[in-house]
Image: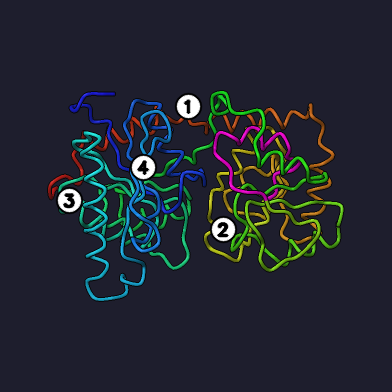
Amino acid sequence: MTGDSDPRQAIILSGWGWRTNGTPERLARALSLAGWRILYCENPASFVRRPRQARFPLAAAVEGFRPRFLGHRLNSLPFGSKLQGKLLANQILEQARELQLTRPIVIYPPGDWALDVAREFGRRGLLNIFLCTDRVEGFDPEGLAAECAVTLVIPRTVYLQLRAKLGDRIRLIPQLGAPLDGEGGAPACSRAAAALGAIPRPRLVFLGPARRRVHVGLLENLLVTHPDWHFVACGPVPELRLPNLHEIAWFDPAELPAILRHVDVGFMPYDCGLEQALHGVALKLYDYFAAGLPVVSTPLIHLWEYGNLVYLGDTAEELAEGIRRALAESAEDPRRDERRRIACAHSLESLSPTFSSLLLGILEAGDGHEGDR
């Protein structure tokens, strides 16, 4: 542990949970590699549905905690969201004090619930940083960005929009990929990997929940036309019931290397009609790249620069042609090494010093502390 005077202290809020292995989760691990102490807070849960739980260790220098609130419906009532913001802030600060985090920065994901928490922490003199990972439907990032000293943005299109309005308080950052060391001795197999290995080949794998993300019409057309191709995701596609559509359970981040050994094609048939999908920077891209795997995807804006490494298509026929070409790739194809090189540049180890220096620089500037804004 570091001393109390060490500024490398952070509270990272997440709209998800540790197993989703999203950007907040990867940022927590990347900062811990640079000597930061982290209190990681999962998505708040209702007092009614879940009893209070103690903190739980997640990784080296990362402690997990799930705060409790009264429920999302209260946010629609007058002063309800402010009350819940104060309630969440009190719980989180209590845990931070127990961990001897004397002056942590607070990092927020997109989400309306985070706005009143940020206001509450701002009133208490803490430095707020908004981690804008996506353009989320129904959420206006400007409101949370205005409450934060600095906003770190991953999608370039969102960065340009916010920077035009808020100037230098908006910073563009790279997306975080997988660790170089394969999670430091990850298990050779796992329940999810075993389930994936039992599915017939070729396996077109979407590493995450497909619901409200994938283009259902394209996917159905593709799987009906090619019944020997098998689509796999973490969770169901409720609109579809097909024999070659499969579901595997969520897996621990440490199991990712074992999972990737059973993947033939990294498949990302996102629905480009959804703003979040079209402008997103998919984490799973770098997971696939880390294994050198061919990737087939609908043409997300971020993927345009990888046209030589990713097979793009916006119709079922174009995606099918991309899959055929991906399956025909040789294990010695030089593009596989190029994908691994890009994944290495986005790895937790490679970006850990970058993110640590960035946050320390923001701290040294004193932005957002005690009414400086």
The reply to whether callout 1 and callout 2 are in contact (CB within 8 Å) is no
Describe residue 268's horizontal placement relative to residue 74 as left or right.
right
Q: Residue furthest front?
A: 51
The reply to whether callout 4 and callout 2 are in contact (CB within 8 Å) is no
Query: Reading the chain from its start, which is encountered first: label 3 or label 1?
Result: 1
Query: Reading the chain from its start, which is encountered first: label 4 or label 1?
Result: 4
Horizontal and vertical percent for residue 84? 26, 63
Amino acid found under the numbered disc labelled 3: Arg
Q: Which residue has dot 4 on it?
A: 40
Q: Please state which of the two labelled residues, at mark 4 or mark 2, is closer to the viewer.
A: 4
Rounded to the nearest angstrom, the CA distance separating label 4 from label 2 is: 26 Å
Q: Which residue has dot 3 on it?
A: 373
Q: Quadrant of the N terminus?
A: top left
The segment highlighted magenta reads 248-267
Residue 240: quadrant of the picture: bottom right
Q: Which residue has dot 1 on it?
A: 349
Rounded to the nearest angstrom, the CA distance separating label 3 from label 2 is: 33 Å
The reply to whether callout 4 and callout 3 are in contact (CB within 8 Å) is no
